[in-house]
Amino acid sequence: MSTGARLKHPNQPTYVDRHGVRRFKANAIIEHLLYTGAIDLNRLLALIQFTDDDRAQFAQLSGYSVSGCGDLSYVTDAKYASVPESDGDAV
């Protein structure tokens, strides 16, 4: 890998929840921080030093729905198209 190459974030695995919504598998640490109020999601994402790729990865790590992720302004069509089919069972 060249020194200037930028690594890409991987896609989180997806699954279908009990309501039939395809979601990204959430990261337990991120969920804890979000749902305990330890961080304010809107304030965090408003900070300009984060790249769109970092914001898209954060949405996946927080368990965002796949369809909703495609509507986020910072998720490119190419990134959305790279999301794998559901690779987990319904929950």
Image (cartoon, grey):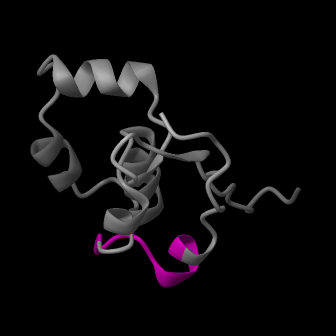
In the foreground, 1 or 37: 37
Q: Quadrant of residue 63?
A: top left
Q: Quadrant of residue 70?
A: bottom left
**Does 28 lie within the magenta span?**
no
Residue at 61%, 53% (x, y): give it: 11
Q: Is residue 3 left or right of residue 83?
A: right
Does residue 10 sit above or below 73 in this rendering?
A: above
Q: Is residue 81 left or right of residue 30?
A: right
Location of the N terminus (image quadrant)? bottom right
Q: Start and end of the magenta stretch?
A: 72-80
Q: Position of residue 3 (x, y in %)?
A: 79, 56
Q: Position of residue 85 (x, y in %)?
A: 64, 62
In the foreground, 49 or 10: 10
Does residue 61 sit above or below 48 in this rendering?
A: above
Residue at 44%, 53% (x, y): give it: 54
Residue at 85%, 60% (x, y): give it: 2
In the foreground, 66 or 45: 66
**Does 77 lie within the magenta span?**
yes
